Amino acid sequence: MNLNSKRIEALVKLGNHLLDFNPNDKNYSFLQEQVKSASESNGWFTQQSIEETFKSWGTTLSIEHITTWLKPYLFSNLKKSKKIALILAGNIPMVGFHDIISVWVCEHKALVKSASKDLFLLPYMTDFLTSETGENFITYETGKLTGFDAVIATGSNNAARYFDHYFSSYPHIIRKNRNGIAVIEGNETKDELIALGKDMLQFFGLGCRNVAKIYLPEGYDLNKIFGGVYPYASLMKHAKYANNYDYNKAVFLMSTFDFLENGFFMLKEEKSFSAPIACTHYEYYKNIDELSTLLDQQKDLIQCIVSHLDIENSIPFGETQNPALWNYADGVDTINFLLDI
């Protein structure tokens, strides 16, 4: 490992800066302005969700975590600096920041096309990094991307088909739709089920790591799942969530789908991993070994698995939106990709 120590120190300082964020502190007045602008631009980005994002990144960007993340790589083998086009999603606050800091530590240049409703938080973060080192590494582009050497693009399955075609001649990582899932054993505690509620509904369930599908043992009492989401009843005070809940409930009723609901959240028995807003799909299983085999066969559709059963790469309840730096989206090692181009 042979790293630019100034850049690592800048990441750690940014982490501490985010951990200490206080919207009422005058030292954070400009960042709070960006938070307000982000919320006004994207109705799903609430003050609370953005502060949760700051706390998560603040905890993640510790020297211990960064060292563990980067220790396996040989940065001394880095070839000359390249320009990396980053096409970012905008479903939850600061999504895509991991790609940005991966380019940063590999000392490439980043050409970033952010989602149209996510134009305020990431520039603040990258301005902080460049001001700490005096090394400008990033350009934000609103028009057509040109003059790049490689691409990392994240989008829907439809967008991914376009990306695959358009960027086929470049080294690339193309990310598609994936979802988080949970596997319930049946003896989970009340606290674990509340944590599962967080996994389903944090950021309104819009993240690719949010649990959108639950596997349950046969005969499981679904009221336990509703009990776990009860702390999130206040989501109905958010107009966009409430409108989506009402709309999707109406669609289910008109389509005569069987589903259960509690006034703000729905459960629907369904094989699909991807569920609409305010709903989680569920399915019963008989044998955990058979289920493990099925999940392995469908791993390209799964972003993460929440369970305390012995399932490969499973994570604890409540941690879906706190991935470690080495938990790469879609299981594709971004650092290796950037070091090899």
Image (cartoon, rainbow, N blue to C red):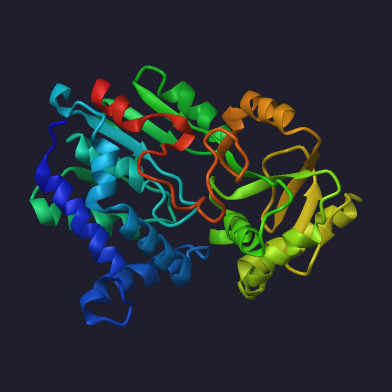
Q: Is residue 170 visible?
A: yes
Please tell me which residue lies in front, 218 or 329: 218
Query: Residue at (63%, 63%) from the top-left corner?
Result: 194
Considering every residue shown, the one lying at the far right of the view is 256
Locate residue 162, reporting x and y percent: 51, 28
The spot of residue 169 in percent (x, y) is: 37, 17
Q: Position of residue 29 (x, y in %)?
A: 26, 77
Q: Is residue 123 left or right of residue 228?
A: left
Q: Residue furthest top?
A: 169
Count of residue discs: 0
Quarter of the image with the N terminus in it: top left
User: Which residue is more in the foreground, 290 or 211?
Assistant: 290
Q: Residue at x 79, y 67 (%)?
A: 262
Confirm whether residue 243 shows in the render: no
Residue name at image x 71 percent, y 53 percent = 187
Which corner quadrant of the image does residue 55 belong to?
A: bottom left
Quick check: 136 above or below 311?
A: below
Horizontal and vertical percent position of residue 253: 88, 56
- Residue 133 against residue 33 in the figure, above or below: above
Side of 248 where 154 appears, left or right: left
Rendered-image quadrant of the C terminus: top left
Left or right of residue 305, residue 66 in this image: left
Q: What is the quadrant of residue 306 in the picture? A: top right
In the image shown, does 335 or 249 lie closer to the viewer? Answer: 335
